[in-house]
Image (spheres, rainbow, N blue to C red):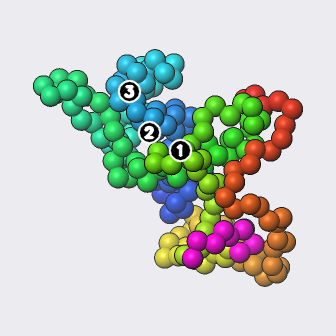
């Protein structure tokens, strides 16, 4: 694929990663989801350099993922909260947590269980579903070019898809239990 600036790409994955694709950004979003609001608390919880923290927070505010709001009535200190755009990242964060629990942890090392507040029951595994709520596997999906597919930067991706489509159906993977994020058994958690 040719070199390009992420801002020039029409690929939603490229644009999303350009905004969210570094470790600190996703950890900041996780912190806000868990209730952190203050700059000093972000710095303390994450061990992030203050200049890096300031840059990441400013980028998320400018993009519309976070907004600043007064922490107290007099409004001298500002905190951060998710905007609607930021709240739309909740399934992304939950999926990353469930994926990490399944593939990088053992059942004994899972640090946080996500539960529904009203019932206390764990969330079911987040899966790709159709409009009727049925879980879809990769073999159930198809792709079609969108309005931006004619862009030269998308051409290699569209060509690869068309070549794959001509070779016939993909093999169907083993069925998975659609509602249980079962951890894969490992002797030890993966250390990164």
Task: Using the rendered image of the protein, determine whether residue 55 is visible from the camera's viewpoint.
Answer: no
If the image is split into quadrants, where does the C terminus sit? top right
Query: Element at badge 1?
Result: loop
Task: Using the rendered image of the protein, determine whether residue 176 is visible from the camera's viewpoint.
Answer: yes
Looking at the picture, how far across and down is residue 176, in whole percent? Answer: 77, 61
In the figure, residue 189 lies in which quadrant? top right
Dot 3 and dot 2 residues touching (CB under 8 Å): no
Task: Provide the residue designation for mark 3.
Answer: 54
In this rendering, position of residue 119 left or right of residue 180:
left
For the residues marked 3 and 2, what is the alpha-carbon distance in whole angstroms?
18 Å
Work out whether 49 lies above or below 168. above
Q: Nearer the viewer, residue 68 or 55?
A: 68
Q: Nearer the viewer, residue 18 or 65?
A: 65
Furthest residue toward front: 119
Furthest residue toward right: 187
Task: Provide the residue designation for mark 1.
Answer: 120
Mark 1 burial class by Cα count in 10 Å: few <14, some 14-19, many 20+: few
- Residue displayed at 80% across by 44% down: 184
- Residue displayed at 68% across by 41% down: 100
Q: Which residues are magenta?
A: 132-140
For the residues marked 1 and 2, what is the alpha-carbon distance in whole angstroms?
18 Å
Looking at the picture, how far across and down is residue 148, in whole percent? Answer: 50, 72
Work out whether 88 lies above or below 117. below
- Residue displayed at 68% across by 46% down: 99
In this rendering, position of residue 72 left or right of residue 116:
left
Reply yes or no: does residue 76 show up in magenta.
no
Reply yes or no: does residue 134 show up in magenta.
yes
């Amino acid at each position: 694929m040719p070199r390009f600036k992420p801002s020039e790409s029409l690929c939603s994955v490229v644009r999303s990663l350009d905004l969210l694709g570094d470790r600190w950004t996703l950890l900041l979003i996780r912190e806000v989801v868990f209730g952190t609001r203050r700059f000093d608390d972000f710095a303390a919880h994450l061990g992030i350099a203050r200049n890096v923290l300031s840059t990441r927070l400013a980028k998320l505010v400018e993009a519309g993922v976070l907004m600043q709001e007064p922490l107290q009535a007099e409004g001298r200190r500002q905190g951060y909260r998710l905007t609607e755009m930021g709240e739309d990242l909740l399934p992304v964060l939950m999926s990353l947590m469930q994926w990490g629990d399944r593939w990088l942890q053992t059942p004994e090392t899972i640090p946080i269980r996500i539960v529904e507040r009203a019932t206390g029951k764990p969330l079911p595994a987040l899966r790709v579903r159709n409009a009727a709520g049925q879980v879809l596997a990769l073999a159930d999906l198809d792709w079609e070019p969108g309005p931006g597919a004619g862009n030269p930067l998308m051409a290699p991706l569209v060509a690869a898809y068309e070549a794959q489509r001509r070779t016939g159906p993909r093999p169907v993977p083993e069925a998975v239990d659609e509602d249980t994020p079962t951890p894969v058994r490992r002797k030890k958690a993966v250390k990164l």
